Image: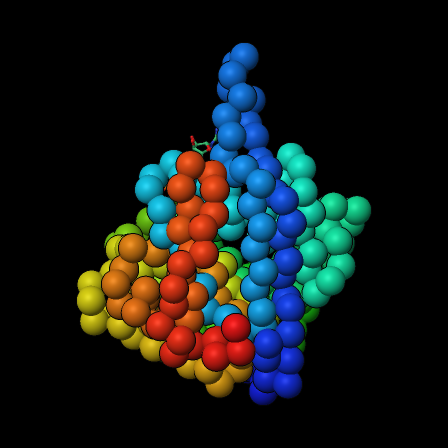
Amino acid sequence: MGFGSRFCHVRGAKFLDAQRLTKTYRVGSETVYALRDVNFVALQGDFVVINGPSGSGKTTFLNLMSVIDRPTSGEVFIESQPTSTQSEGQLAYLRKTKIGLVFQSFNLIPVLSAAENVEYPLLLQRRPKPERQERVAALLAEVGLSDLARRRPNELSGGQRQRVAIARALVSGPMIVLADEPTANLDSKTGEAVMDLMRRLNEEHCVTFIVVTHDPAVSRYAGRRVRIHDGRLEEGEGNGVAASAS
Ligand SMILES: Nc1ncnc2c1ncn2[C@@H]1O[C@H](COP(=O)(O)OP(=O)(O)OP(=O)(O)O)[C@@H](O)[C@H]1O
Ligand SMILES: [Mg+2]
């Protein structure tokens, strides 16, 4: 799949460190607090599951962790480097090389086929064509979409689009994957296959996962559970299966 065991020597190293994050939005004259004074650390190889009611700040939190969005105050360190002082170009490079994202709304590119959407991160990284073809085919097979590779997003069902988004997040071998309800539209069999893939990447390649989910199958596997409520983050218990380093 193109993942080396290159990350495993750093299992347990601090990858992400969020300190005192607050995010507010202005809506008219009102200030909405999406996150309040949140601290969070993720170690390389962690598998963290995030729960919380609708509107509690989960997607906002993932957007800050993936440096898509900047906090109103506080700092996100990635591999001990502060991100607030980095340029948009530097943050884009970080996302391109280290971070895989599965958005709640998938964010697929409508004019590209499933295969081209999955290939897109590899094009950004200027990987050679034979490697791109091999990886795209491998990832589409992993998520059970080999037969639908040429379809565009609007010719796919919700669950099929979700699987394209998952394949795209994993294709370039990221160190960390942030996923917003990745199994929400999948039947239990397909959801399990996706969970198996995430588990393998976590166990064999030390990929760090931070997953917003209400799916018990994903939650069961979590090394750590975190709850977000009213913009505040509380650490809960994991089952200790994954991320034994934490
Ligand atoms: N761009 C925005 N402008 C104004 N308010 C926003 C914006 N984005 C999010 N919010 C508000 O911030 C709060 C947190 O939103 P967020 O999307 O993080 O919630 P969530 O936990 O992901 O919810 P869900 O489970 O429904 O996806 C909500 O009150 C939401 O209305
Ligand atoms: Mg959300």
Give the percent coordinates (x, y) of residue 108: 45, 52
Seen at 59% across and 79% down, the residue is 11
Give the percent coordinates (x, y) of residue 83: 73, 51
Which quadrant of the picture is home to ligand 1?
top left
Q: According to the image, what is the colour scheme of the structure?
A: rainbow
Q: Taking 229 as reference, is 69 left or right?
A: right
Task: Relative to 105, say whether 132 is above or below.
Answer: below
Q: Taking 53 as reference, is 64 left or right?
A: right
Is residue 180 visible in the rendered structure shown here?
A: no
Give the percent coordinates (x, y) of residue 149: 37, 67
Give the percent coordinates (x, y) of residue 196: 34, 77
Is residue 30 visible in the rendered structure shown here?
A: yes
Seen at 79% across and 46% down, the residue is 85
Give whichever of 238, 77 is nearer the camera: 238
Farthest residue in the top direction? 29
Seen at 32% across and 64% down, the residue is 219
Q: In which quarter of the image is residue 7?
A: bottom right
Seen at 42% across and 36% down, the residue is 230
Give whichever of 28, 144 is nearer the camera: 28
Counting every numbered tag in the picture gives 0
Q: Taking 146 as reference, is 27 left or right?
A: right
